[in-house]
Image: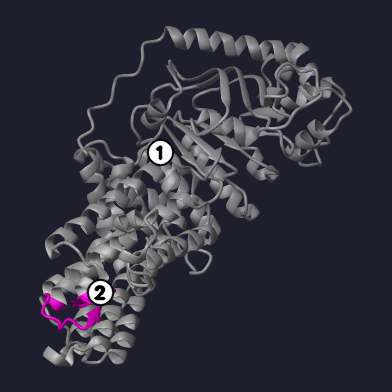
C-alpha cells in the first residue's frame, strides 16, 4: 500500500508547476467510411464521425475521468488529447494551457501511460527507469537529475522490492500486473510532467492494486498536475479519488463537470444533474457503474438533454472562458536547447538494451545456433573437399566446391529470419517511444544494425573458421570471412525490411523465404546467367548472394583450376568461366557492401512510412 503522507511529501518536491489545463473546444473527429450510406447526413458516404462537438476542460490539479459505455469514444478522445492519432480528420481546438496541443508541446509538458504495459521485458524495473531517464533528458545535466529521482520514485511507488526483477513478458515470468502498471506510471514521474494522460490505468488489476494506482495519481494531482484518465468500472474506493467527469456516448458529450461538487448547491455535480433528469443514484450501488449504465440506456437523448440543460450551458461557458483566458497568457518559457542528439540516444540504446540482449541466451542462440549448425553439417559433408590441387580438381570436385561456396552465401540469407522477431515483437515499444519523442528513427535503426553487426562478428568467425579449415578451402581466410559476414549483414537488412513491411510474424516469415528463393533461382547456380532468358538476366545483378558467391569463387580457385568444361563451340573452360563469375574480389565485395546500404535505406524508409498500429 502506498503511504499517502509519504507520497505527498515526495510529490511536493517536484519542479515548480506550470498551470496547464487541457482545454477541448468543439472537437470533432472523422474517419473514412469506406462504404456508401443511404443516410441523408452530409458527407456520410465519405466519413464516420467518432467524436461530435466535444467541449470540456480538464483543470490543473484535478483528477478527471473519461467514461462512457463501450464505443463511446473514450480512447479516441484521449488519443486526440495526447496527439497520438495517426489517421482521420480532427477539427476544433485542443490546448495545453496557452499552447496548441502538438507533438512538440506534448513532449515538453505531458506524458502518456498506455493501457497495455509496453515495457522492455529484458530490463529490470530499476534499469527501465534509468533507461527512460536518459532517453527523455534534453541535456546531460537533466539526465543526471532525472536519474537521481529514480530511487525515490521506486520507494514511494512501492517498487523497491522488485527493482532488480526483470519486467518479463507472457513467456518469461517477471513482475506482477500491478507492479507493471506502477512501473509505467513511474516512467511518467521520471519526466515530471505537468499533464498526465492514462488509458485504463486500473484495467486488469485487483481492487487493492487499483486503489493503490489511483492513490498515486491523486497525490500527483495534488501537486498541480492535470491528470486525465479513461476508466472502466472502477471500484467505489478508486472512483472517489476523481474530481471531475467527462461522460461520452456515441462520441457525444452527455455530461462534463464535477462528480461530487457541492458548490452552487451541488446542482452542477454529476449526481445532482442525473437526478434532475430523472435518474437518481442509489447510494448503496457503485456510482461509476450507475453513471455508465444510465448513459448506455436509450430512454433519453442524453446528449441533447445535457446540451440544453443549465448544467451543460454552464460547462460550455466555463470552457470558453478558460480558453479565452489561457489564449491571452504568454507561452511558457522555451526549454533549453537539447544537447543529447541522435548519437547520444544510440549510446543509450546500446547501453541498456544491447548489453541486456547479449546476456540473453535466447537472443544469442537464435542468431548463433543456425550459423554453427550449418557449419558443422557443411564441413562434415564437404570434409577437405578444397584440398585438391592440379588434376585432382576435376569436374566433380569443382562443381562440389562451387556448390559449397554457393550454399555458404545463400544460407545466411535464409537464416536471417531469426532477426525478424526483434523488429516485430518490439513494435509496440518502438511506437510508444517514438510517440513520446524518445529518439529519432535514425537512432533506432543505427542501434539495431550496430547490435546485430557486432554480435555477428564472433558468430561468423567461429562458424567460418570451422568451415574454412574443415573443408580445406584455398585463398585468403580474411576474404572468405568478410564475404560471409557481408552477405549475412545484407540478409539482416533484408529481414528488417520484411519485418517492417509485414503486419505480423506470419507475414514476415512468408516474405523473406519468397525473396530468398528468388535469389536462389537467379544467382547463377541453378541456371547459369548465360542460359537465362534475356528478359531475366538483368535481375541477377541486383542480388547480393550472387556477388558474395562470385567473390568466394575467385578467392578459392584464383583462375588456377583445370579447364574441364566444354562449351558448345568446343572451347574448354574452368568453373569460374563456366558459371560466368565476373569481376574481381574487390568489385564483388563493393557490390555486396552497396546492396547492404541499399537494404538499410529501404528498411529505414519502410519503418518511417509504414505504421501497423492505427489510432
Q: Which mark is residue 436?
A: 1
Magenta segment, prevailing SS (helix, strand or loop): loop
Question: Where's residue 54, x and y in %?
Answer: 64, 20
Question: Where's residue 94, x and y in %?
Answer: 52, 20
Q: Residue at x 54, y 47 (%)?
A: 213
Say if the magenta span includes residue 175. no
Label 2: how many Cα within 10 Å (few below 14, some 14–19, many 20+): some
Mark 1 or mark 2: name the one nearer the start of the chain: 1
Residue 47, by quadrant, is top right
Q: Is residue 555 visible?
A: yes
The part of the chain drawn in magenta is 557-575
Question: Where's residue 290, x and y in %?
Answer: 79, 37
Please determine whether, in this image, residue 164 is positioned above or below residue 298.
Answer: below
- Looking at the picture, the colour scheme in use is one colour
Please determine whether, in this image, residue 154 is positioned above or below residue 304.
Answer: below
In the figure, is residue 405 to the left or right of 231?
A: left
Residue 399, by quadrant, is bottom left
Q: Residue at x 49, y 24 (%)?
A: 60
Say if the magenta span includes residue 560. yes
User: Which residue is the site of mark 2?
Assistant: 459
Q: Is residue 157 visible?
A: no
Marks 1 and 2 in Cβ contact (< 8 Å): no
Q: Observer-nearest residue: 179 or 37?
A: 37
Q: Observer-nearest residue: 292 or 41?
A: 41
Instruction: Kindly report the distance in space between the C-alpha atoms of the residues bearing marks 1 and 2.
Output: 35 Å
In the figure, is residue 155 to the left or right of 597?
A: right
Label 1: how many Cα within 10 Å (few below 14, some 14–19, many 20+): many
Residue 420, by quadrant, is bottom left
Q: Residue at x 51, y 62 (%)?
A: 510
Amino acid at each position: 500500500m502506498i503511504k499517502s503522507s509519504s507520497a505527498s511529501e515526495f510529490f511536493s518536491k517536484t519542479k515548480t508547476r506550470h498551470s496547464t489545463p487541457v482545454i477541448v473546444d468543439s472537437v470533432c473527429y472523422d474517419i473514412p467510411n469506406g462504404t456508401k450510406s443511404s443516410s441523408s447526413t452530409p458527407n456520410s458516404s465519405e466519413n464516420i464521425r467518432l467524436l461530435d462537438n466535444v467541449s470540456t476542460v480538464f483543470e490543473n490539479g484535478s483528477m478527471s475521468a473519461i467514461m462512457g459505455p463501450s464505443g463511446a469514444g473514450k480512447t479516441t478522445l484521449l488519443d486526440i488529447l495526447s496527439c497520438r492519432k495517426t489517421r482521420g480528420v480532427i477539427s476544433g481546438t485542443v490546448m495545453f494551457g496557452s499552447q496548441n496541443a502538438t507533438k512538440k508541446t506534448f513532449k515538453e509538458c505531458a506524458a502518456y501511460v498506455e493501457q497495455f504495459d509496453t515495457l522492455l521485458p529484458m530490463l529490470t524495473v530499476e534499469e527501465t527507469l534509468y533507461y527512460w531517464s536518459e532517453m527523455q533528458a534534453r541535456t546531460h545535466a537533466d539526465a543526471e537529475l532525472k536519474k537521481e529521482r529514480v530511487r525515490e520514485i521506486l520507494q514511494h511507488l512501492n517498487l523497491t522490492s522488485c527493482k532488480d526483477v526483470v519486467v518479463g513478458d507472457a513467456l518469461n515470468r517477471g513482475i506482477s500486473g500491478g507492479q507493471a502498471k506502477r512501473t509505467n506510471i513511474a516512467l511518467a514521474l521520471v519526466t515530471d510532467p505537468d499533464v498526465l494522460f492514462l488509458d485504463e490505468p486500473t484495467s486488469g488489476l485487483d481492487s487493492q492494486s487499483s486503489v493503490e494506482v489511483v492513490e498515486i495519481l491523486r497525490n500527483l494531482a495534488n501537486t498541480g498536475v492535470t491528470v486525465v484518465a479513461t476508466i472502466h468500472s472502477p471500484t467505489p474506493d478508486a472512483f472517489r479519488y476523481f474530481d471531475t467527469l467527462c461522460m461520452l456516448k456515441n462520441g457525444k458529450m452527455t455530461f462534463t463537470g464535477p462528480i461530487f461538487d457541492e458548490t452552487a448547491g451541488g446542482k452542477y455535480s454529476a449526481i445532482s444533474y442525473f437526478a434532475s433528469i430523472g435518474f437518481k443514484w442509489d447510494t448503496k450501488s457503485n456510482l461509476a457503474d450507475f453513471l455508465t449504465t444510465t448513459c448506455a440506456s436509450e430512454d433519453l437523448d442524453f446528449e441533447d438533454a445535457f446540451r440544453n440543460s443549465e448544467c451543460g450551458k454552464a460547462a460550455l461557458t466555463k470552457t470558453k472562458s478558460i480558453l479565452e483566458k489561457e489564449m491571452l497568457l504568454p507561452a511558457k518559457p522555451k526549454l533549453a536547447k537539447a544537447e543529447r542528439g541522435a548519437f547520444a540516444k544510440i549510446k543509450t540504446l546500446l547501453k541498456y538494451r544491447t548489453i541486456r540482449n547479449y546476456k540473453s541466451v535466447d537472443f544469442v542462440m537464435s542468431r548463433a545456433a543456425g550459423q554453427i549448425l550449418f557449419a558443422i553439417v557443411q564441413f562434415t559433408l564437404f570434409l577437405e573437399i578444397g584440398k585438391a590441387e592440379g588434376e585432382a580438381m576435376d569436374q566433380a570436385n569443382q562443381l562440389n566446391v562451387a556448390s559449397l561456396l554457393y550454399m555458404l552465401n545463400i544460407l545466411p540469407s535464409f537464416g536471417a529470419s531469426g532477426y525478424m522477431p526483434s523488429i516485430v515483437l518490439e513494435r509496440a515499444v518502438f511506437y510508444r517511444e517514438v510517440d513520446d519523442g524518445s529518439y529519432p528513427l535514425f537512432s533506432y535503426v543505427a542501434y539495431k544494425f550496430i547490435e546485430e553487426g557486432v554480435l555477428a562478428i564472433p558468430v561468423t568467425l567461429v562458424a567460418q573458421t570451422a568451415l574454412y579449415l574443415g573443408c580445406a578451402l584455398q585463398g585468403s581466410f580474411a576474404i572468405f570471412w568478410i564475404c560471409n559476414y557481408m552477405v549475412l549483414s545484407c540478409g539482416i537488412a533484408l529481414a528488417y525490411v520484411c519485418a517492417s513491411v509485414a503486419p505480423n510474424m506470419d507475414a514476415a516469415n512468408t516474405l523473406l523465404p519468397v525473396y530468398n528463393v528468388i535469389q536462389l533461382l537467379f544467382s547463377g547456380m541453378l541456371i547459369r546467367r548465360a542460359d537465362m532468358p534475356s528478359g531475366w538476366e538483368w535481375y541477377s545483378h541486383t542480388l547480393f548472394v550472387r556477388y558474395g558467391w562470385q567473390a568466394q569463387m575467385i578467392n578459392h580457385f584464383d583462375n588456377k583450376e583445370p579447364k574441364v568444361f566444354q562449351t558448345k563451340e568446343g572451347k574448354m573452360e574452368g568453373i569460374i568461366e563456366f558459371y560466368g563469375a565476373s569481376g574481381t574480389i574487390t568489385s564483388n565485395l563493393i557490390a555486396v557492401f552497396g546492396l547492404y546500404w541499399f537494404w538499410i535505406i529501404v528498411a529505414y524508409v519502410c519503418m518511417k512510412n509504414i505504421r501497423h498500429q492505427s489510432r
